[in-house]
Image (tube, grey):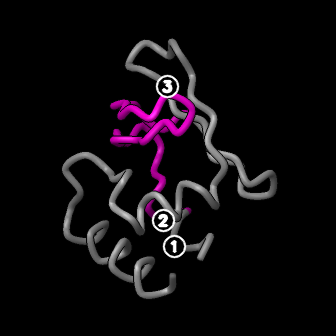
Amino acid sequence: MLDLLGAILRAGRWFRVYEHSTQKMRWVKLDAYYPAQNSIVFAEFDGASPLGVRADQFVKDLQQGLSSPTNPDAHTRALIAQLMKAG
């Protein structure tokens, strides 16, 4: 499942991410993905207000439709469909 996630998480890609602590949506771009640490870091356009997310929680949020890439291409939509089947 982390292989699929790694393919979805491309540098500079924008996402709609559900922030559980505030129960609000944020539109942020991928800053870094650390699979070995189960960690993803998103940030606003200027790098401000970083948002750290556990990778396994982000997968659940993708599967539930709480989070998603902004304007995904066909390849990314196919990867997310595979991720949903894996869950």
The residue drawn where x is 48% and y is 54% is 9
Q: Calculate the distance from the C-alpha at mark 3 to the C-alpha at mark 1.
A: 21 Å
Q: Amino acid at mark 2?
A: Ala
Q: Position of residue 68 (x, y in %)?
A: 33, 53
Neighbour tally class for label 2: few under 14, some 14-19, many 20 plus, Cα within 10 Å: few
Q: Are marks 3 and 2 in contact (CB under 8 Å)?
A: no
Neighbour tally class for label 1: few under 14, some 14-19, many 20 plus, Cα within 10 Å: some
Q: Are marks 2 and 1 in contact (CB under 8 Å)?
A: yes
Quadrant showing the N terminus? bottom right
Q: Nearer the viewer, residue 25 or 4?
A: 25
Q: Amino acid at mark 3?
A: Ala
Query: Height in image: 10 above or below 28?
Result: below
Q: Specify whether 62 is left or right of 32.
A: left
Q: Specify whether 36 is left or right of 56.
A: right
Mark closer to the chain start, 3 or 1: 1
Would you name the residue on which mark 2 appears?
Answer: 7
Would you name the residue on which mark 1 appears?
Answer: 4
Q: Calculate the distance from the C-alpha at mark 3 to the C-alpha at mark 2.
A: 19 Å
Would you name the residue on which mark 3 appears?
Answer: 43
Query: Height in image: 50 above or below 79?
Result: above
Q: Specify whether 39 is left or right of 5.
A: right
Q: Amino acid at mark 1?
A: Leu
Outermost residue, bottom side: 85
Query: Height in image: 51 above or below 44?
Result: below
Q: Position of residue 46 (x, y in %)?
A: 43, 12
